[in-house]
Image (cartoon, rainbow, N blue to C red):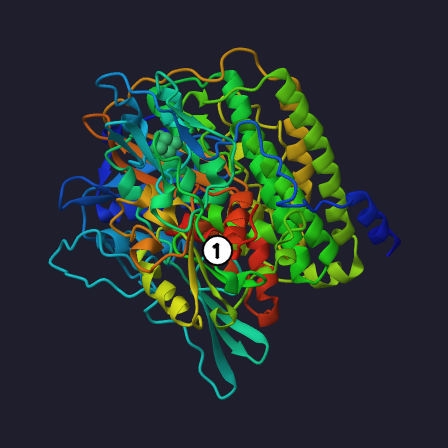
Amino acid sequence: MDFSYRESVDLRDAPCLSGENFAVEVQACIARGFRVGAFFGLPHGPEDVGLVAVLCPEEDGNLCVLHSRPLTSYPSMSPTCAELHWFEREVHEQWGITPEGHPWLKPIRFHAPARSAFGEVRPRPLPGQTSYFAVQGPQVHEVAVGPVHAGVIEPGHFRFQCLGEEVLHLEISLGFQHRDIERMLTGGPDARTMHLMENAAGDTSIGHSFAHCALFEALTRTEPAPRGQMLRRVALELERLANHTGDLGALAGDVGFLPTLSYCGRIRGDFLNMTALLCGKRFGRGLLCPGGTKLDVDEALIAELRKRLAAAHRDARGAVDLCLYSNTVRARYDDCGPISTNAARACGLVGVAARASGLARDARVQFPVAGAAPGDIPLSKCESGDVYARACVRSHELDRSADFIQRALNALPEGKSAVSTPALPPHRMAVGIIEGWRGEICHVALTDAEGRFAAYKIVDPSFHNWFGLALALRGQQISDFPLCNKSFNLSYCGHDL
Amino acid sequence: MFDVVRERVRQGYRTCRYPALAPELPERFLGRPRIAAAPCPPGCADCLAQCPVKALELRPQGPALDMGRCVFCGACARTCPQKTIVFSRDHRVASRSREGLIISSTDPGQQPGKAIPLFRRSLRLRQVSAAGCNACEADCNVLTTPVFDLGSYGIDFVAAPRHADGIAVTGPVSENMRQATLDTFDAVPDPRLVIAVGACAISGGIFRDSGECHQGVSALLPVDLYIPGCPPHPWSILDGFLTLMGRSR
Ligand code: SF4
């Protein structure tokens, strides 16, 4: 069933497919140029779980949703659609639904099984304890890192198969950050809901809470207050500026180019402090609410924001150019961790990583939020798919985001910053799609007969992209891992939820 | 080379002189809460209903607020009909005791508590993210930037627990990070500290009722310093560390 990303549907209007037909239809859709936005299990009853796939068009247009009857197995689609392999593992781990023929069904989060239906009582796996890809041979060695890393960073486990310096394969095992957010959201919305959104991935508080608001407004058919909507978009771009600046600094740090590292560390804080001017918190918590923003701005604040933005943007530009125009830095960024356009498409990359590999994927262009014109923040794209390309995409976006914020603050719509929203309607499904600074954030929720969340699915861009990092490292030197890793800078908790 | 020098001059000197000079905090920043000694209207419990983390308790003398659970959302202060709960802009919220985080009209929160002289000049910490959402982690990490210049206080985040005086834990401690957190602590030589940074590490925060989390590191290890907030402001974190070292104002 096709539907607009800004409207809600009743899933019961879509045909409920058998496992076989579901797999056939999803693959046909992907063959027609769609990609996977979300793929998850939907409980129909205490023991019955069906599958739902939300597919996004490569260009703009309607989304497609497909769903299946309750099932215990279905033919795996991973052999033909690589971008689904992680999703199929996720559903298998959560609901015990087996994709027959999946190349390697392993846990991705190592949590307690959501249920022990179908007679299969599975013990809880220990985190990271599973079989790993291994390379044999006299000179091959294995390097294992984590879960606790050397820096101030979230936990994850990485295993490298190396021949000398060269990495033959990297396997990434996550799940250490699993907090069970999706389950905590079902039965809501309640006083915790917005806070859980802001904590899904703390560095993307605005992105995830915006996605939730968009979803909420689609479900309740609310037009957000134009002023609030613009403020949210300003906050979203501020979040992008802060994180891109931090990432560009960290990339410079990983090749030992210290001036950019130290300037960007400070400038990132300047952007965060601008968000704090809006709402008191550097990560933008407490700013957004369904219907608009909880807090408004006055003329003095707008003027202050514009002044600070101009200064911080100039500083960021200076710091970043210093590094991108340096030959020694270029020598390290070029050809490091390349991903071809075809590989990026096949594994379903989104966001900065996708655009660096030549894919025109940007939810701000394809799925603009209510009131936004599709081209008002142009898409930034590179072709080479290496660390340099990922740095360049960020560098371009610094200018485009700063430019947008200046224009937005200059012409902020009048009126209140929020409208009130009605209660959620029963039996509806909607999505919220937002281009966070890492990439596309997709939330999908279905309400029950009482208008409460029967299921809430969060797809952080990192969920699509972690495998991209593994791919990028093939054939690279293991000493380039920090650089490659930083060029993706993916979220652990956004993946683990 | 010339460009590098020119840009260095343009970027200027940015390090703040803390604690000698008070840090600049945004107008809308919510810091240490204050609770007025005014009796609540009979039957009013509006703040309790608003709180997402059950941080408030109604006592006979009025509400008591647990900063160890609070995410500083301000919902209670906005809803209070007579402004009994207000949030100041004081960033100094850290305490060496759990009780020191509870604020009521009769008790404005205990003094931060005694310093440990042994760490007066040097404090090396291993940071452990145990299901933290990367907000607390980021606000710890930012202390190493030139604005805060953590190293100039003799404080550093180190790569190995063997080189550390203690661990600074962020996050509610997921079941999947429980063992790794305990192992990291075990690898720190005695005498060693545990610092809980953020509402999640202190009490589980918003994840208190998640079946997959352990209500913070306080539930697993004895904690020497609590730094509340969601996330705590970097200045609050630095103030906490300095408190422990006996070098706060
Ligand atoms: S500010 Fe703290 S105590 Fe008040 S409602 Fe929010 S979390 Fe609860």
Badge 1 element: loop
Name the foreground residue: A392 vs A297: A297
Q: Position of residue A450 (x, y in %)?
A: 19, 25
Quadrant of the rendered image containing residue B25? top right
Residue labelled with disc 1: B115
Q: Position of residue A191 (x, y in %)?
A: 31, 30
Residue projecting furthest to the left: A119
Q: Kindly tell me whether residue A382 is visible in this rendering.
A: no
Figure check: A322 above or below A162: above
Residue projecting furthest to the top: A415
The answer to whether residue A474 is left or right of residue B84 is: right
The answer to whether residue B119 is left or right of residue A148 is: right
Chain ID of residue with mark 1: B
The answer to whether residue A209 is left or right of residue A341 is: left
Residue type at mark 1?
Ala
Figure check: B120 above or below A464: below
Which residue sits at x=14%, y=61%? Answer: A121
Which residue sits at x=17%, y=39%? Answer: A44
Which residue sits at x=42%, y=20%? Answer: A291
Name the foreground residue: B101 vs B110: B110
Quadrant of the rendered image containing residue A213? top left
Q: Position of residue B127 (x, y in %)?
A: 48, 59
Name the foreground residue: A54 vs A107: A107
Q: Position of residue B199 (x, y in %)?
A: 39, 44
Q: Quadrant of ligand 1?
A: top left
- In the rendered view of the protein, which quadrant contains the N terminus of chain A? top left
The answer to whether residue A240 is left or right of residue B162 is: right
Quadrant of the rendered image containing residue A458? top left
